[in-house]
Image: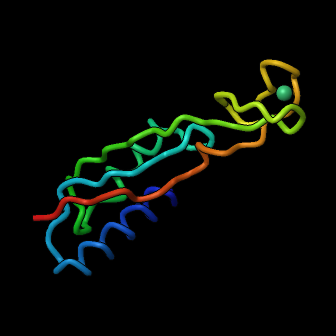
Amino acid sequence: MSLAVNIVELAEAESLAAGGGRIRRVEVEVGALAGVMVEALRFCFAAACRQTMAEGAELVINTVAGEGECASCRQTAVMEENFSRCPSCKGLLRPLKGQELRLAAIVVD
Ligand SMILES: [Zn+2]
C-alpha cells in the first residue's frame, strides 16, 4: 500500500510542478527483480488515488526484464528472480538490470 501512496505523491508533485492539472495517467517502470507484485500494486493504486489529484487515473506499468552478470565467469544472463544462477557454471548472478522502480511519466489535463 505504501508503495502506491508513494507513487501517487510523486505524481502529484510532478503535476504541481507542471501547473497542478488533474492526473489522467501514471506510468511506472517496475523491474522484474524489484519485488513488486504488479497486481497488488494496481489494486492499491486505485485506492491510493482516491481524493487526490490522481483520482480515477490510469496506471500503466512497464516491466523491465532482469539481467545479471555471473560472479564467476562474467557471462550475462536473463534473471527471472533474485539469486538466479548462471546457466553455464551455476555461479550466482549479480543483478545489472531489473531492480528499478520509478515514476516514468504522468499525463495531466
Ligand atoms: Zn557463470
Between residue 74 and residue 15, name the one nearer to us: 74
Q: Is residue 64 left or right of residue 43?
A: right
Q: Where does ligand 1 appear, by image quarter?
A: top right
Could you tell me residue 41's position as x and y percent?
45, 45
Between residue 90 and residue 101, name the one nearer to us: 90
In which quadrant is the C terminus drawn?
bottom left
Between residue 57 and residue 82, name the one nearer to us: 82
Name the outermost residue toward the front.
74
Residue for point 40% across, 59% down: 103
Could you tell me residue 93's position as x and y percent?
79, 35
Q: How many marks?
A: 0
Between residue 41 and residue 29, name the one nearer to us: 29
Q: Is residue 1 left or right of residue 35?
A: left
Could you tell me residue 55's position as x and y percent?
22, 59
Q: Is residue 85 left or right of residue 20?
A: right
Q: Is residue 95 above or below residue 17?
A: above
Task: Name the quadrant containing residue 90.
Answer: top right
| Scheme of colours in the image | rainbow
Name the outermost residue toward the left.
109
Residue for point 30% across, 47% down: 59
Residue for point 86% across, 39% down: 71
Could you tell me residue 86's position as x and y percent?
80, 25
Q: Is residue 100 above or below residue 63?
A: below
Task: Name the quadrant containing residue 22.
Answer: bottom left
Name the outermost residue toward the top.
88
Q: Is residue 33 left or right of residue 91?
A: left
Residue for point 75% across, 38% down: 69
